[in-house]
Amino acid sequence: MADNTTVSSSAVVSARPELSIHNGIVTTTSIQVAQFFGKRHDNVLRAIRVLLRETASENRLLNFEETSVETRIEGAANAQGGFRQDPAYRMDREGFMLLAMGFTGKEALRWKLAFIAAFNRMEAELQKPAYDPARIQLAHSLAAQAAAQVTQTVFDAIASGRDSDWRRVRYLLSFGYDRDGQPTIPQAQVVGDDQMVTSLNALIQHITKHDVIPSDAQLAALVTACAQQLSERVQVRELRAAAKASAAPATTSTAVAAPIPPHIGHDGKPLPPGTFRAVFV
């Protein structure tokens, strides 16, 4: 598929591949592939075109985008120097992997790994949230308010002297929003010894595994509250089902024809004396 000949590492640029983001996708170019793998660019172009022909049914044009590069013209005929547009391809990670499959040798393996690392690095950068000055400013503001709340809460707990063992006190820091969607002042509060911060699923697991050992009265209160809520839900479902049934259109009852006596024929006329029509039930 491609020219498998490689040049010595001294002829290859020592810098790591620098990829670019094109339409939100990390890409490299046939120029870079030729440069780092030590191949002639026209051979790389030929390999890509062969690959596109061989995979035409799979629509690999999505992985390779035809483009052009500006090349300086040197020579006596153009002493001032000039530029021309040469064909090239821009490719995504999948396109590069398909193309690089045809490159063999230890040097080629080294550059395959370097390109894969470059793709991973750039794609990780894409996953990072975009820099938003307003969000950064809000984060600094909330962090400062939260620090002030924590400082005041801890100071009050220690200075009040109400808690003999204040070193073991736990604190809960919470953030909220008002009706307009604006963040409110962070709140810091002490978490008591008989309080816990957990999800419902985790609470069930804690009770099952005896990580949390409530009293008999507490367990009974939990059971009563859960049973009451289940009962209320059943009532709501029954009311909804009844309302749905009453809203459904009434079905018209079809009249059932009276059975024909056995001494009457199918034509409705009486049968001769002593004969009866067979009736199977």
Image: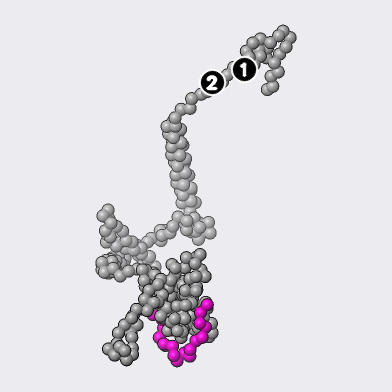
Q: Position of residue 173 (x, y in %)?
A: 34, 63
| Up-down relation of residue 155 to residue 116 (above or below) | above
Count up the numbered dots: 2
Query: Along the horizontal axis of the image, is 19 left or right of 100?
Result: left
What's the residue type where badge 1 is placed? Pro
Residue stretch rendered in magenta on the structure? 1-18
Residue 194 image-quadrant placement: bottom left
The alpha-carbon separation of the residues under discs 2 and 1 comes to 12 Å
Position of 107 with respect to 154 (left or right) is right
- Identify the residue shown where x is 47% and y is 65%: 59
Dominant secondary structure of the magenta stretch? loop
Residue 239, above or below 184: above
Q: Is residue 13 magenta?
A: yes
Q: Is residue 28 magenta?
A: no
Judging by the rendered image, the residue that carries numbered circle 1 is 259
Reading the image, the residue beneath label 2 is 255
Examine the rendering and report whether any part of residue 240 can be seen. yes
**Residue 238 or 155: which is nearer the viewer?**
238
Measured as percent of width and height from the top left, residue 109 is found at 51, 82
Q: Residue at x 47, y 77 (%)?
A: 46
Q: Residue at x 40, y 77 (%)?
A: 88
The image position of residue 230, as x and y in percent, is 47, 44
Q: Secondary structure at mark 2?
A: loop
Q: Which residue does the image show at 45% across and 92% down from the upper left?
A: 10
